[in-house]
Amino acid sequence: MTGHDPFGLRSLTVDQLRSTPGVKWQQHPDRLAAWVADMDFPMAPAITDRLQSIIDRGMAGYQQWGTGASPAGRVFVDRMASKYGWSIDVDRVHDLADVLQGVRLAIGMLTEPGDAIALHTPAYHPFLQSLADMDRRLVHAPFDVDELRTVIALEKPVALLLCHPQNPTGHVFDRQQLEAIAEIVEEFDLIVISDEIHSDLVYGPKTHIPFASLSPAVESRTITVTSTSKAFNLASLRWAVMHVGIERFDVMVRSYPRHWFGSPNLFGVEAAVAAWTGGDEWLAAVMDVLDENRHRLAELVEAYLPGVKYQIPSATYLAWIDCSVLGEGDGPFELFQSRGVELSPGMQFGANGSGHVRLNFATSPAVVEQIVATMAST
Ligand SMILES: Cc1ncc(COP(=O)(O)O)c(C=O)c1O
């Protein structure tokens, strides 16, 4: 609905954005910022109101949440039921500070150094870093499920780290693909760590299907980790949630002292509750702008960067762009830096990122246009 802009998403300008305090616009002040996965949009009023009400109370002492999931963890349970028909046991839900914490906990506690872990590549770079840091062997998982089966049979990984929807390609695994993946992980007895942080950012008519919701058998071999931080732009509030489908992991988590996992922050919890109970109107407006931007980007790339290949993503505000035609080898990122735009270098996402850049289009349509025009400037 172009023109109607109740949340001020369409009118953002580069001058305004340059004065915002986050890392995105401050780290490279001379360049247009289209790199880190933060959106330029101001927070949903439902969230700012709720955070303001805590400040107005003037109290931030220990909360009476009891043991188990926080109020945000409980809202996660409700949202999975109402949005996806996935009914989960709240006792299997744990609050975390961030999604990577859950991913690393699951890798560290359920696999051993030297074990192989499959991951679709190109991949979100902290996943690659986590596997390297933890001495796990990366198995490149093909997106095609027949090829995936061959690779798994050959490489014998113990786990699949599933990024669903996928960063950086914006791929949404549909039911058929998910069921084929489920068959493979059951046949070869893999556990699945499913990062679903981008699941609120799927463009219709496609829909998200939580991997663990496929069947009780699939759930029993899956850890799901997600958060409000991407779709509602709350990364610094440090809250995420983990659903533990794997019985032995549940026993392990309970056997460790609670303090080893940390405990959630009041503001992070309250923001997540506000996002998932009162933020959907704002999210729909955001998706409206993002949907326009992802299509407009195709026209802009064609007009300004002929020959460069961009496939419109099915989810996320990230565009995975193949710039091989520019003949810059691994480094089109440096070329665009020199022209005044900060993107994410393709090589960061693994070896098959050569010749690519990732562009973050979560900003106003005018700024997207300015970014692409600047990428083409000489
Ligand atoms: C797939 C994926 N997982 C995790 C994260 C980071 O989440 P957190 O800050 O909660 O660890 C991101 C951030 O871009 C992401 O794209």
Image: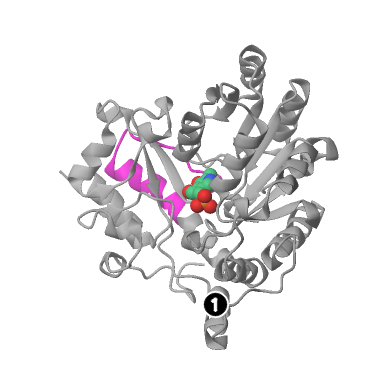
Rendering coords of residue 121 (x, y %): 50, 29
Give the farthest residue toward the front: 257
Side (left or right) of 308 relative to 159 = left
Seen in the picture, residue 209 relative to 56 is either above or below; the reply is: above
- Residue 307 lies in the magenta-colored region: yes
- Please give the name of the residue rendered at 74% of the width and 68% of the height, measured from the top-left corner: 66
Density class for disc 1 (Cα within 10 Å; few <14, some 14-19, many ≥20) is: some
The amino acid marked with disc number 1 is: Leu
Secondary structure of the residue carrying tag 1 is helix
Bounds of the magenta span? 293-315
Could one spot residue 164 in this view of the protein?
no
99 magenta-colored: no
Count of numbered circles in the view: 1
Residue 328 seen in the current view: yes
> Residue 309 or 222: which is nearer the viewer?
222
Residue 141, above or below 211: above
- Residue 182 lies, in percent from the top left, at 74, 30
**How far from the left and from the top, in percent, is residue 112?**
61, 26
Quarter assignment of residue 223 = top right
The quadrant the C terminus occupies is top left
Provide the residue designation for mark 1.
Answer: 51
Side (left or right) of 247 relative to 102:
right
Farthest residue toward the left? Answer: 378
Q: Residue at x 32, y 55 (%)?
A: 369
- Vertical arrangement, residue 233 with respect to residue 58, above or below: above
In this view of the protein, which residue sits in the foreground, 347 or 129? 129
Q: Residue furthest right?
A: 216
Q: Residue at x 34, y 51 (%)?
A: 34
Where is residue 171? Give x, y as percent: 56, 39
